[in-house]
């Protein structure tokens, strides 16, 4: 059996990380799969480790614009799959416009299926893009021979809008790279910190409308006014202009001299684990996540976590964190204060979240993915 992977629209972020990690630990032969052919842009292919069973394919259109890649997928990919004698197509990007059968796709972006989140973007270009993605992914999911979801929450959210046969779906959690795993920290009372050596908080995520960094800035300001010796580092690229403007405004309003709020727009994946290991507490204020890779990395790092109570976060973190409404700076501040004041609570939740993080393994994700691909191929053949 030979599988083809269409990674034509996998070009950065979590999508590339997923492919890199999934294929790095994969053992397709355990599932009767002799080889895997993957089509992607050159930059994506270069990040994939070489394997004897992995055939990398690049074409000039795959390194060009979105329209070029859509054209390639719709009018060229099917022929490539036939020429390579592929038995099944895997589309991790969630959108497929071709006619090849059977194919299995994957839901890695929940935003197009969250009306409340789409409203944040109104009729901006990105808002229109989300509405278009809803259309294309709905069609892709309906026509697919199988759909992989990353969390139960994501599956339930999509199935509220698209009537899918649940027997043709599965849930496969992402894994965590081993470099993020540390040890649960020895927690110190807040009295051991001072303004010159504050408790260090961390929030990692790109600057976006549904990440609510500005609410966290305001919450930290409230706690500083109460006299708590804390600081926070925000790490994440300024992907959305409107959101970045709101974030900058909050920094200028609440910490104009940059005394307790620090922003690093660019930290490489190779370096990011050091920031987890050098922090005392993690904050995650997103209101929409298909999975929450960053959250699981913080869990693996053994950090006590204050987290959004929305979307898939409670499913991942469980009893390993304390929760807040990310839309309320007052509630964020109150939740953080509870953690800051209670060393024993920090110790307890960091132990629980660290233990929970161990179930998120890329080996498991890879095995479950290839097992499902094999099963869906068999279902198609036995129709």
Image: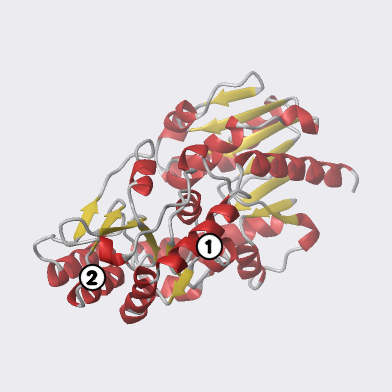
The secondary structure type at the circle numbered 1 is: loop
Estimate the x, y position of residue 103 in percent, counting from the top left: 71, 45
Whether 273 is drawn above or below 162: the answer is: above
> In the depicted view, which residue is nearer to us: 247 or 261?
261
- Near-viewer residue (77 or 293): 293
Quadrant including the N terminus: top right
In the image, 373: left or right of 175?
right
What residue is drawn where x is 47% and y is 61%?
347
Q: Is residue 210 above or below residue 148?
A: below
Q: Residue 339 is drawn in which quadrant?
A: bottom left
* Res. 110 mark: 1
Check disc 2 and report the residue beneath it.
228
Q: Earlier in the sequence, mark 2 or mark 1?
A: 1
Graded by Cα atoms within 10 Å as few (under 14), some (14 to 19) or many (20 or more), the crowding at tag 1 reads: many
Q: Residue furthest right?
A: 382
Q: Which mark is residue 41?
A: none
Residue 29 found in image quarter: top right
Percent x, y of residue 358:
60, 48
Can see residue 263? yes
Find residue 157 and report its image quarter: bottom right
**Are there few (<14), some (14-19), or many (20+) residues within 10 Å of tag 2?**
many
Location of residue 179 in the rendering, given as x and y in whole percent from the top left corner: 47, 38
| Secondary structure of residue under mark 2 | loop
Is residue 291 visible in this depiction of the protein? no
């Amino acid at each position: 059996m030979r599988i083809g992977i269409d990674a034509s629209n996998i070009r950065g972020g979590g999508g590339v990380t997923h492919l890199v990690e999934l294929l790095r630990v994969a053992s397709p032969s355990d599932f009767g799969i002799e080889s895997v052919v993957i089509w992607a842009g050159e930059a994506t292919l270069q990040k994939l480790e070489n394997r004897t069973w992995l055939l990398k394919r690049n074409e000039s259109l795959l390194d060009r614009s979105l329209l070029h890649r859509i054209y390639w997928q719709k009018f060229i990919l099917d022929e490539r799959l036939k020429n390579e004698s592929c038995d099944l197509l895997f589309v991790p990007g969630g959108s497929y416009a071709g006619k090849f059968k059977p194919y299995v796709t994957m839901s890695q972006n929940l935003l197009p299926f969250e009306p409340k989140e789409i409203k944040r973007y109104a009729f901006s270009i990105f808002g229109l893009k989300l509405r278009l993605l809803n259309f294309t992914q709905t069609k892709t999911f309906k026509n697919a021979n199988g759909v992989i979801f990353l969390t139960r929450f994501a599956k339930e959210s999509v199935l509220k809008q698209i009537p899918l046969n649940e027997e043709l779906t599965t849930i496969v959690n992402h894994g965590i790279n081993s470099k993020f795993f540390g040890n649960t920290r020895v927690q110190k009372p807040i009295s051991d910190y001072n303004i010159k050596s504050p408790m260090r908080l961390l929030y990692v995520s790109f600057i976006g409308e549904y990440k609510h960094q500005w609410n966290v800035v305001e919450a930290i300001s409230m706690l500083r006014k109460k006299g708590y010796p804390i600081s926070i580092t925000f790490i994440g690229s300024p992907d959305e202009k409107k959101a970045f403007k709101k974030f900058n405004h909050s920094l200028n309003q609440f910490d104009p001299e940059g005394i307790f709020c620090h922003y690093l727009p660019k930290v490489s994946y190779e370096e990011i684990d050091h920031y987890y290991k050098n922090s005392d507490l993690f904050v995650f204020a997103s209101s929409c996540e298909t999975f929450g890779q960053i959250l699981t990395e913080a869990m693996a790092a053994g950090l006590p976590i204050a987290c959004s109570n929305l979307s898939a976060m409670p499913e991942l973190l469980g009893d390993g964190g304390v929760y807040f409404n990310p839309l309320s700076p007052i509630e964020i501040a109150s939740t953080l204060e509870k953690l800051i004041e209670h060393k024993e609570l920090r110790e307890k939740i960091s132990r629980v979240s660290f233990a929970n993080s161990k179930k998120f393994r890329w080996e498991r994700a890879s095995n479950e993915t290839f097992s499902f691909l094999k099963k869906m191929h068999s279902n198609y053949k036995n129709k």
